[in-house]
Image: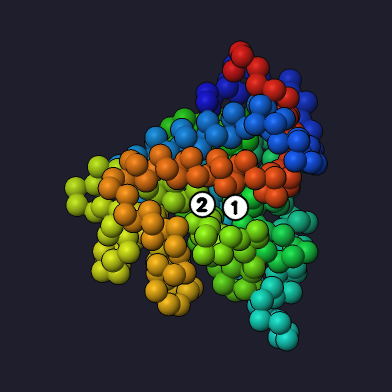
């Protein structure tokens, strides 16, 4: 994926459009797998996977103005959670205050995105903002899942395509922006007791996220002493979670769930038996394609526009 593609074609000539759903039936899935959007999306995920390989979260990396602005945007969403406390209601799950929080984002999304996008690219804001709105869960069902996470990755991919984010922002995209996004999503999930969207229960990898396991396993490739078997060891997790996304995810699961790890997170337990992190990483990428990107219930909600188009891959890219 050429993340500087915007420099070849001046974005001003592009006709931005409001993204919409294109995958309406199971047979449409072939259209998605052949699409430019799919190629660019998976290319973006894999580029970032390479970028963070073997690096701790505390690694020294460049932080551009655009990255700072994205973190500020996420800080705003976080502050709105504080300003929208959960309401008293009979049902334990799906606190309705989430809808109030979401309505605020729905209203402000374009203004928020406009703080990140320079004025000469203002025409792209309505298109890009759709992905931000899609990335925080569903306000009708008050649930959150890997499709919402994918919308956030798509949001970042679009910012790369219009040249707001650049190749040298790669590490900061994962370590600073995506990591902050995860913190805000965990706070949403906890505060409003959100349901997992389309969760496979103990058979899924995690109720809510997938990408931090991919990028987090890449971070651990060739680690001098931490092996996959160590992530089910409480001591190893407690001592290293601040440096590694994967372990941060494990910590969150153990905080949220009770009982033996092998029972509540069977897939992860199985993964802890894999001998090396690079094997874990490759396996998770395969699993992500099969369990998320090739599943109709997830992809039927994905939206396509001019930046992530439904048309088949063009060879020039």
Residue at 45% across, 45% down: 284
Foreground: 60 or 290?
Answer: 290
Q: Is mark 2 on a helix, strand or loop?
A: loop
Q: Residue 146 carries which label?
A: 1
Query: Measured from the top left, where is residue 121 in percent x and y?
Result: 69, 32
Give above or below for 312 relative to 27: above
Does 91 sit left or right of 282 as displayed?
Answer: right
Q: Gap between marks 1 and 2, in whole Å?
A: 6 Å
Query: Measured from the top left, where is residue 75 in percent x and y?
Result: 56, 59
Q: In which quarter of the image is residue 195?
A: bottom right
Label 1 crowd (10 A; few <14 / some 14-19 / many >=20): many
Q: Which residue lies furthest to the left in this view?
A: 224
Q: Is mark 1 on a helix, strand or loop?
A: helix
Query: Measured from the top left, where is residue 200 in percent x and y?
Result: 58, 60
Query: Measured from the top left, where is residue 38 in percent x and y?
Result: 62, 32
Q: Mark 2 points at which residue?
A: 210
Q: Residue furthest top?
A: 316
Scheme by which the image is coloured: rainbow
Label 2 crowd (10 A; few <14 / some 14-19 / many >=20): many
Q: Quadrant of residue 138?
A: bottom right
Foreground: 11 or 5?
Answer: 5
Label 1 or label 2, whichever comes before in sequence order: 1
Residue at 70% across, 23% down: 312
Quadrant containing the C terminus is: top right
Foreground: 90 or 128?
Answer: 90
> Is residue 182 in sight in this rendering?
no
Residue at 31% across, 54% down: 273
Is label 1 in contact with label 2 (beta carbons under 8 Å)? yes
> Is residue 48 in sight in this rendering?
yes
Residue at 55% across, 68% down: 187
Does 114 sit left or right of 45 as displayed?
Answer: right
């Amino acid at each position: 994926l050429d993340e500087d593609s915007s420099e070849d074609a001046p974005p001003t000539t592009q006709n931005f459009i409001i993204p919409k759903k294109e995958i309406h039936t199971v047979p449409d899935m072939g259209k998605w797998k052949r699409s430019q959007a799919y190629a660019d999306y998976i290319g973006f995920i894999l580029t970032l996977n390479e970028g963070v390989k073997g690096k701790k979260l505390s690694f020294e990396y460049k932080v551009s103005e655009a990255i700072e602005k994205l973190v500020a945007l996420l800080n705003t969403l976080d502050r709105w959670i504080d300003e929208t406390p959960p309401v008293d209601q009979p049902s334990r799950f799906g606190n309705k205050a989430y809808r109030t929080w979401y309505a605020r984002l729905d209203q402000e999304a374009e203004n928020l995105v406009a703080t990140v996008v320079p004025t000469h690219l203002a025409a792209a804001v309505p298109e890009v903002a759709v992905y931000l709105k899609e990335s925080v869960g569903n306000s009708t069902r008050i649930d959150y899942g890997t499709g919402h996470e994918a919308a956030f990755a798509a949001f970042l991919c679009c910012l790369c395509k219009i040249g707001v984010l650049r190749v040298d922002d790669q590490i900061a995209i994962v370590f600073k922006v995506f990591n902050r996004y995860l913190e805000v999503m965990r706070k949403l999930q906890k505060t409003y007791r959100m349901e997992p969207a389309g969760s496979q229960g103990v058979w899924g990898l995690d109720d809510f996220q997938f990408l931090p396991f991919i990028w987090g396993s890449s971070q651990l490739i060739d680690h001098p002493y931490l092996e996959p078997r160590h992530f089910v060891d409480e001591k190893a997790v407690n001592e290293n979670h601040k440096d590694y996304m994967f372990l941060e995810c494990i910590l969150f699961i153990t905080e949220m769930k009770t009982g033996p790890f092998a029972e509540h997170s069977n897939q992860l337990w199985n993964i802890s038996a894999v001998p090396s992190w690079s094997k874990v990483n490759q396996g998770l990428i395969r699993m992500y394609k099969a369990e998320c990107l090739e599943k109709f219930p997830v992809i039927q909600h994905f939206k396509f526009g001019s930046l992530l188009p439904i048309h088949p891959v063009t060879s020039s890219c």
